[in-house]
Image (cartoon, rainbow, N blue to C red):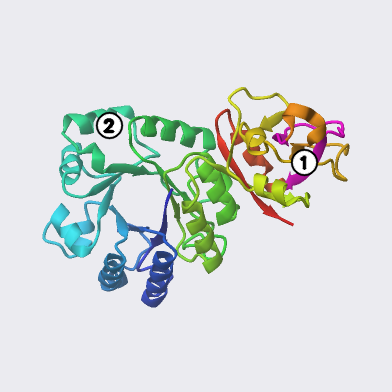
Amino acid sequence: MRTGISLYPGLDRTAAENKALLVKAAELGIDRVFTSLHIPESNTVVLQEEMAGLLQTARHYDLDVIADISPAAARLLELPALTPKALLDLGITTARFDYGFDVRKIAFFSHFMGVQLNASTLRPSDLAALRAAGADFHRLDSLHNFYPRPHTGLGEDYVQRQNQWLQGEKIRTGLFIPSQSGRRAPFHAGLPTLEKHRTMTVEQAGRHAIALGTDSLFIGDDGPSLAELTALAASGREEKGCIVLRARLISHDPFIQDLLSTTLTSRLDPAADAIRAQESRILSKGQAIRPDETAGIAITCGDVTVDNDGYGRYKGEVQISLVDQDGDGRTNKAAVILEEDRFLLSYIRPGSKFRLVLSN
């Protein structure tokens, strides 16, 4: 998954702060930058003064700069005309079109630079019009809106439907998550796409975005902490669609610890009461797994278990329990999914990849 930050020259933060954020993000491997050229609260004089320097820094680090543009962008950037060459010469590599442009102009831009569509409002008729206008779909991707006012963010079902449709059309999708440490004016209430992300940490929202199969993830606010940038960069290194769950380790067996740290796959024939790892028994072949002090202890929802030698050919099977169960001496309780991450269990479907991040 690609990752990005957001910069808004002319708002709260100074040019030095914006540059420092840009450099730190690039050093962490974050390779995309979102900015908007039509925020009503922006100081346009400051924006004009600072934008060139930020774009030069972004170009130095070979970052994909996405500018949300309106028909007034040419005047704001002091360009004689809004053309692909003019934007590329400035260092803007992707133009995000939202309103005020006809489909022929968008199609024209797509033959020279990246073009980003609004994933929150796009409809099949829009794609049909772009095809008819001869757009280069290899240069298209999409990004959802962010929603500054609390309770206006999108619902998950809608985002998933839009993403599945767009990805089925070979168009990559992206969304915004908020910072909890440096929120943007004027409301300072976070800039998420999904309303449920508004109060989540970057780490937790990132894991949820991965579970949703998102292609790009941006922090919408312009004041993220170093810890948040680091968490965002870590999200970008995860396999797309792999559900990452934090868990408290119980087992003292080094082999079980290694087994649980492996990326596993949910079986294609899902059990009613547990998520079963399809490869764990193969990985455990020839390895003794003795009953330990947890064998026979009652199992609760969110417990991670490993069948021991007593279960014969099931030895080594890793399960995440979805219900409370009676204890069984043939099963060791090896770890417990942290309570705040258990909502992610519902995203592990038949054939899904999942991985545990273990802590003591």
Q: Nearer the viewer, residue 216 or 191?
A: 216
Residue furthest out toward the left: 80
Location of mark 2 (residue) = 127
**In the rendering, at what x and y percent does residue 71 appear?**
21, 51
Looking at marks 2 and 1 on the same chain, the residue that comes earlier in the sequence is marked by 2
Q: Give the crowd class for mark 1: few <14, some 14-19, many >=20 residues within 10 Å.
A: some
Residue 348: quarter of image: top right
Residue at 26% from the left image edge and 51% from the top image edge: 95
Residue at 52% from the left image edge and 33% from the top image edge: 157
Say which element carries label 2. Answer: helix
In magenta segment, residue 278: no
Q: Which residues are magenta?
A: 316-338
**In the rendering, at what x and y percent does residue 7 appear?**
38, 63
In magenta segment, residue 321: yes
**Residue 152 in sight:** no
Q: Give the crowd class for mark 2: few <14, some 14-19, many >=20 residues within 10 Å.
A: some
Please, what is the three-letter code of the amino acid marked with disc 2?
A: Leu
Instruction: Name the mark nearer the viewer: 2 or 1.
Output: 1
